[in-house]
Amino acid sequence: DAAPRADPDAPPPEPSAGDSAEAAKARSAFDDVDAATSGSLPVDRFEDLLDAVGEGFHGDELEAQRAKVDDGSGKITREAFARYYVALVENADASDDSGDEEEREEERGNAREAFDTVADGKTEVPSSKFQALMEALGTTYCEEEHRRTLRKLAPGGTVARDAFVEWYVDWVLGDGDSDDDATATDDDDDPAAESKAAATWASLTAAKEGSWKCEVCDVRNDKDASKCAACETPNPAAPQKAAASGNAVSAPGSVGPGGFSFGGGSVGVGGFSFGAPAPAPAGSIGAGGFSFGAPAPAPAAGS
C-alpha cells in the first residue's frame, strides 16, 4: 500500500523545545492548565502558565513576556510555551553568570590593590607579610586558620601576586576549599609539603643574633627594626624619646608654711602682699594713734 500523502495545506510541524528538564517541566505545567487537553490555550491564560512553572511577572514586564509567545493568533501552543520557558531559564542562568563574574572581577581589583600596597610594587612578598595582606583587605587574620593556605600559596616562603589574588577571590566568595574543611589526614598524605611548610615557618620564627620576637605573631625581626615586619607591632626594646629634663620652673605662686604667695609676695603674720616686698609704709598705727607720712615732730618742751 502506498503511504498517505502529506496534506500540502497542513501547517509545518512545530519546532520542538527539546528534551531538557526545563522543557519537560513546561509541558507538564501546560497540561495542568489545559484541562481540555486541546494542545493550545488563549493568550490570556499565559499568567496561569507562568504560575504553574513557579514564575511571576507583573505589569509591563508581564506584557513584555506575553508578547514573546503571542504569534498573533491569540493562542499559545504547548510546544511554544515549552520553548519560551527553556529560553527564559537559559537567559536567567547567563545573567547570573555575568553578575558573578562582575563580582569576582571587583574582588580581584581589591586584592591587587592590597597586594601592591603591602608589596610596594613587587610581584611577591615573604610569607610573613600574609597577615598584612589580609588586614589591608579589611579581613581578620588567624594563624591557625590560614596555616594551610600558606602551605599552598607559599611553599618556598614567598607569596606570588597572581596566586594570592585568585586564592582570595575564591576564598571571599566561598568558591574555594575552606581551610577548615581539610582533615588531619591531608597532612599525612603529603608529608613533604608539611615538612616544607614547617621549615618555612621555622625560618620566620627562628632566633637570630640580636633579633627580637614579636609578641603578637612570633615573627623574628632585626634588632634595629622599630616595628614588626609582619604585623607592625612596635619593638618594645626600641629607644624611647627622652623625657623633658631640667629643673621645673617655679610657679609664680605657691602655698608654703608662711602662707599663700604670688610671685614675690606672701600672706604671713604681717598680712597679704603681691609681687616684691613692699617698702616700709609711710604711715603706721602705733601706741599713740594712726599717722600718715613722715613721723610727727617731737612735742615742744614745756607743752
Image: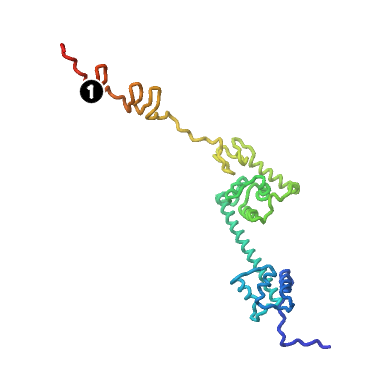
Residue 220 left/right relative to 29: left
Q: Residue 196, position in %: x, y?
A: 69, 45
- Which SS class for mark 1? loop
Quarter of the image with the N terminus is bottom right
Quarter of the image with the C terminus is top left
Instruction: Report the amino acid beneath label 1.
Output: Phe
Residue 71 vs residue 169, the one in the foreground: 71
Q: Residue 161, position in %: x, y?
A: 61, 53
Q: Residue 3, position in %: x, y?
A: 80, 86
Residue drawn 40% across and 26% down?
Answer: 255
* Mark 1, other Cα within 10 Å: few <14 / some 14–19 / many ≥20: few
Q: Which residue is mark 1?
A: 292
Coloration mode: rainbow
Farthest right residue?
1
Residue drawn 72% across and 78% down?
Answer: 39
Residue 95 vs residue 213, the one in the foreground: 95
Q: Quadrant of residue 254?
A: top left
Residue 119 vs residue 297, the one in the foreground: 297
Q: Is residue 187 above or below residue 169?
A: above
Q: Residue 26, position in %: x, y?
A: 71, 71
Q: Quadrant of residue 50?
A: bottom right
Residue 74 left/right relative to 238: right
Residue 8 left/right relative to 64: right
Give the number of marks: 1
Residue 294 vs residue 82, the one in the foreground: 294
Residue drawn 72% across and 70% down?
Answer: 25
Q: Is residue 72 above or below residue 266?
A: below
